[in-house]
Amino acid sequence: MADVANKYPQNVAGLFYVDDQCIDCDLCRETAPANFTRNDDGGHSFVYKQPISPEEEALCKEAMEGCPVEAIGSDGT
């Protein structure tokens, strides 16, 4: 389960985030490319844009639920 205390600093503020459990599998970037991107230097994903539509939010939730290491979290704000 993702831990907000361990989220990457590149995540933009908002509902979703990626923490340090990320294994750079690319699932979130393929599922919700409008919201997740890769940190090439660190070899991990992060949220670069929070969802602005119900469709984007649904894709982010799908990415969170599909994450193989549960590195995507939602802080409920």
Image (cartoon, helix red, strand yellow):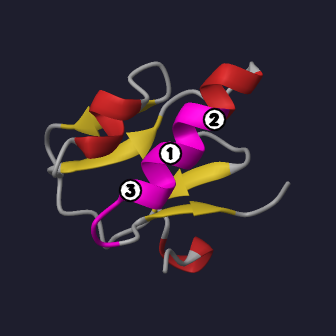
Q: Residue at x 17, y 52 (%)?
A: 24
Q: Position of residue 65 (x, y in %)?
A: 48, 59
Q: Are marks 3 and 1 in contact (CB under 8 Å)?
A: yes
Q: Are marks 2 and 3 in contact (CB under 8 Å)?
A: no
Say if 6 sits above or below 68 in the image.
Answer: below
Label 3, on which residue? 66
User: Counting other residues with Cα less than 10 Å from the Cα at mark 2, is it few (<14), some (14-19), or many (20 or more)?
Assistant: few
Q: Is residue 27 magenta?
A: no
Is most of the magenta stretch helix, strand or loop?
A: helix
Residue situated in front as seen by the camera: 77 or 30: 30
Task: Inspect this view and state whether residue 10 appears.
Answer: no
Q: Position of residue 73 (x, y in %)?
A: 57, 63
Which circle marks residue 58 in the picture?
2
Residue type marked 3: Gly
Q: Are marks 1 and 2 in contact (CB under 8 Å)?
A: yes
For the residues labelled 2 and 3, the Cα–Cα distance comes to 12 Å
Q: Residue at x 54, y 78 (%)?
A: 3
Say if 42 sits above or below 28 in the image.
Answer: below
Label 1, on which residue? 62
